[in-house]
Each structure stands twice: as structure tokens, then as C-alpha cells.
Amino acid sequence: MESSKETGCRAPEDPVLCINDCDFLGSTATMNMCSKCQKDMILLKQEHAKLAAASSKDVVCRSSSSDDSELSLVGAAVASSNLASQISQVKSKEGLKKCTTCRKRVGLMGFSCKCGDLFCAVHHYSDKHNCPFDYRNAGQKAIAKANPIIREEKLNKI
């Protein structure tokens, strides 16, 4: 026990899942995030700082007669809404391989439905996840496109 204090070594901690629900392990050094999520968060913070600086400059240029406190509040509101939209875009781009219905990890065996969602083996049938896709109209359109009506041209009688 005393030798670990002298060398500065710590006992290994229990594994903690990433706070972004990406099913990777995080650590306290990375704020309970995995390395990928931490890199994304750092990039988002940098972009947020750039957007905040740009939006505050725009607000100052547009209304020079307003109070400084009002300007900072408006700039912060614009920047926070931009950050929220960027976070949602990053999460959707990550492409977490989880079933939309039960949130079970599907990995490579996920079934993508025509409604655009990803499902596990249990929920991939359209009646199991209440699919909003209209299969009947899609089938009718596909048949009509594949089998066009062919009519011969009318001949003029001599």
C-alpha cells in the first residue's frame, strides 16, 4: 500500500461505460467518455467557440446602441442553439448500431427497413415495429414502372 503511494501508481478502476451510450468504455480522465466521443466533444467545443466569437461580432456590428449585457445574452443563445444542433448531427452521423425499438446492439446483423430505421432480428418485420412505410403503393408504383402500357400507333387508312 505504501509503495503505491511512493511510486504514484493507482489501483485499476472499475470499467465505466461511455456517457454517450456508444457502448465503449470511458474513464475518469476523459470525463467518463470513450476516446472517440471525447475527440468529438473537443471539436464541438472548438467550433462552438468559433461560432460564439463570430455571432457576437455580428451582433455587435448590427446593433451598436444595445447594452453589452443584451448582446452577450443574444450571442450566447445563438451559440447554444447552434451547439445543440451540431451535437444532434454528430450523434446521427456516428451511426450507432442499435435497434430503434428495443435499443439492443445489432452490430453487423442489423436489418434496415424501408422506413429508414435499423432493427434487430425480433423487430425487423414491419408489423413488429409499426412501420409507417406504405408497401402497397410502393408495389403498385414498381409494377407500373416495370410494365409500361404499349400501344401501337394508329395507321391512316388509305
Image (cartoon, rainbow, N blue to C red):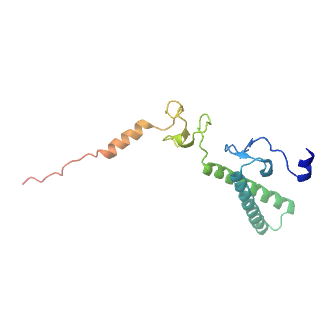
Pick out the residue farthest to the left: 158
Q: Nearer the viewer, residue 135 or 69?
A: 135
Q: Nearer the viewer, residue 67 or 125?
A: 125
Q: Quadrant of the N terminus?
A: top right
Q: Quadrant of the C terminus?
A: bottom left
Q: Residue at x 43, y 37 (%)?
A: 135
Q: Is residue 84 visible?
A: no
Q: Is residue 108 above or below residue 157?
A: above
Horizontal side, residue 15 vs residue 128: left or right: right
Query: Looking at the picture, how far across and down is residue 45, in whole percent?
Result: 75, 58
Total labels: the figure holds 0
> Which of the 4 quarters of the picture holds residue 97?
top right
Query: Looking at the picture, how far across and down is residue 126, in whole percent?
Result: 49, 33
Q: Is residue 11 above or below residue 120?
A: below
Horizontal side, residue 86 vs residue 109: left or right: right
Q: Residue at x 38, y 39 (%)?
A: 139
Query: Looking at the picture, how far across and down is residue 124, in whole percent?
Result: 51, 35
Q: Nearer the viewer, residue 156 or 72?
A: 72
Q: Residue at x 74, y 59 (%)?
A: 48
Q: Is residue 86 visible?
A: yes
Query: Looking at the picture, how far across and down is residue 125, in whole percent?
Result: 49, 33
Q: Residue at x 13, y 52 (%)?
A: 155
